[in-house]
Amino acid sequence: MSDDDELLTIGEVAKLDGTSAKALRYYDAHGILTPFETDPRTGYRYYSPDQMLEMDVIRLCLDAGVPLQSLESFRGEDGSLDWRALMETGRDRVAREAARLRTLETSLDDYLGEVTRKARTPEDGVVCSDLPPTWMVGKPWPYYGGPFMLKPYLRAMTALRAAVREAGLPRLLRRGIIVDCREGKAYAYQQFEASDTGRSADGRSPDTPDTPDTPDAPVTGTAGATDTADFGFDPSLTVFHPTGGPAEGRVIERESLSACFDEALAMVARNDPAEWPHATVCEIWGSHTAEGSIRVRYTRHRCDAGVVGR
């Protein structure tokens, strides 16, 4: 072996870098990091100081989520590791994970807003407000006009939740039934965020009417959003983008979720479509009362349903 006293033993590298000797032997066996020199008599491995930098890159990429077993796939035809390709892969993984975490953060902010919000309802139970724009993805609800069907509704919610997740979009808390009163059509809907920017600090969103004490609702859910509604949803689904504006909402309390929806949808059917082009019936998280009843929020809107894509 060389007499260069700058070479490092495998034990020294393990101590300096924090990587185990077992891992260094694995890297050698799989062509990931070959020692600068190996003593032919003893088999001892020796590493040059600049290989410590290579170890640093390997550790960074492993921390970024590049699987250990895949590292050897970055070897070029000459047997050396393609460091550029490895680092680009690590960076791409970090970018995807960062986007995933931002999506989760947006959803959690919205759910947290429901927990921390302290809305006050007028004596007559009707809340008049200007609602901000929103985005929804909907699945046709063929039972409109008849009794509410709970299990089909829950299956529709599962499908819509999966569609939003697969599109990589933040899922917001609000879900329920949206009715396009002019068309006489209803859809099960799930609200989502088209952009991870522009949400209000308290997580409010369009199915949470402001009280008269808070008349100026912030516009949420549209900052940086695309006007083409090309979110990658299945063609059988419909994207809604109500533009916001004057609305009236009230809470309906009955003995079951089905009874709540039945009453709310009957109220929707009595609306004048020219005055109230669309309405929503939204589940309220944690709405069970001490007496065992449940609540939903019924809201009718001046703006149309904003169908922008299928």
Image (cartoon, rainbow, N blue to C red):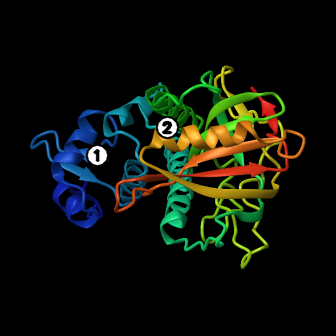
Characterize the local packing of mark 2: few (<14), some (14-19) or many (20 or more) Cα atoms within 10 angstroms.
some
Circle 2 is placed at which residue position? 82
Above-or-below relation of 2 to 266: below
Circle 1 is placed at which residue position? 35
Among numbered discs 2 and 1, the one appearing first in the sequence: 1
Q: Secondary structure at mark 2?
A: loop
Above-or-below relation of 42 to 239: below
Residue 138 occupies quadrant = top right
Three-letter amino acid code of the residue under disc 1:
Pro
Say if residue 119 shows up in the picture. yes
Q: Of residues 145 and 187, which is closer to you in this image?
A: 145
| Residue in the image at 39% along x and 49% along y | 58
Question: Which label number is shown at residue 215?
Answer: none
Residue 39 occupies quadrant = top left
Q: Of residues 168 and 84, which is closer to you in this image?
A: 168
Residue 155 is situated, as x and y percent measured from the top left of the image, at 46, 28
Residue 265 is situated, as x and y percent measured from the top left of the image, at 64, 38
Above-or-below relation of 255 to 258: below
